[in-house]
Image (cartoon, helix red, strand yellow):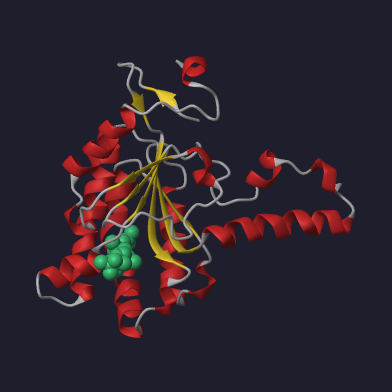
Amino acid sequence: MNSESQSTSKLVPQHVAIIMDGNGRWAKKKGKIRTFGHRAGVKGVRASVSFSLKNNIKVLTLFAFSSENWNRPQEEVGVLMELFKMVLSSEVKKLHKNNVKLRVIGDTSRFDKKLVAQIQDAEALTENNDGLILNIAANYGGRWDILNATKALAEQVKEGSLECEQIDEAMLNRYTCCADLPELDLLIRTGGETRISNFLLWQVAYAELYFTDTYWPDFNEDAFQLAIDNFADRQRRYGMTGEQVS
Ligand code: FPP
């Protein structure tokens, strides 16, 4: 649900998702190889987590690796996998100390055993934390998410425990990756492209969209604040008229 801040009347988002784009172009501009940009992108991850903690954002969902990213050159995919492992081993204790609950959404079955174990350990360690929820989308696709939910419901219809007519949006939502989280309020995409790229397709229905030309490695706390300020001035109408909601 969208929410009003306790201390001001400005809109503040509870759930922010980010498509972290522009690492490759950032590196190219500096005459470096693409993977240099991914390594620099870790700085953007730290800045966005730190900003979310300071600003009482409840959920931060980061698109770290899409189901389509496997099609990138093998070497780049390898560096991204190593980076996830590196970030998990270097940051998890700090996240835990800051009461952050880490979760990974997506099909992790294709990751190597070491990465899967690191993910499970990090999720187990931070499971009972009740501060920021840091949701990392890895081997995630929005269509995959909707498809999984649909299959789960179809199974129940096949078994005879559910009537087709009983299925509604709330029921399908319960089988998606973000079922237990506040609704997505704000989707940010860095790097200048203005598309959704198969991210959170179901959840984006009433989210506000914010696109910035800033490449991900340069996305710092000031850049995040600009997105939040922009969101604060939006009027969320959910299909109603401006008069009805004001
Ligand atoms: C998109 O930039 C970025 C990615 C596919 C990977 C993002 C990964 C990180 C920031 C590193 C680690 C993150 C976590 C959460 C462990 P791009 O390569 O598409 O850039 P381009 O559009 O300029 O080519």
Name the residue at 29% across, 44% down: 97
Residue placed most toward the observer, 20 or 106: 20
Name the residue at 63% across, 45% down: 173
* Residue 139 position (above or below residue 74): above
**One can see residue 161 in this view:** yes
Q: Residue furthest left?
A: 30
Percent across and percent down for residue 130 are: 42, 37
* Residue 91 position (above or below residue 223): below
Percent across and percent down for residue 119 are: 43, 62
Name the residue at 46% across, 69% down: 116
* Residue 53 position (above or below residue 234): below
Q: How many numbered circles does the render carry?
A: 0
Name the residue at 49% across, 45% down: 204
Residue placed most toward the observer, 86 or 10: 10
In the picture, the quarter occupied by the C terminus is top left
Q: Quadrant of residue 5?
A: top left
Taking 43 as reference, is 206 left or right? Answer: right
Percent across and percent down for residue 105 are: 49, 57
Taking 244 as reference, is 88 left or right? Answer: left
Taking 113 as reference, is 146 left or right? Answer: right
Residue placed most toward the observer, 241 or 153: 241
Percent across and percent down for residue 170 are: 67, 39
**One can see residue 38 in this view:** no
Q: Quadrant of ligand 1?
A: bottom left
Q: Quadrant of residue 115?
A: bottom left
Q: Residue furthest bottom?
A: 74
Q: Residue furthest right?
A: 160
* Residue 246 position (above or below residue 97): above
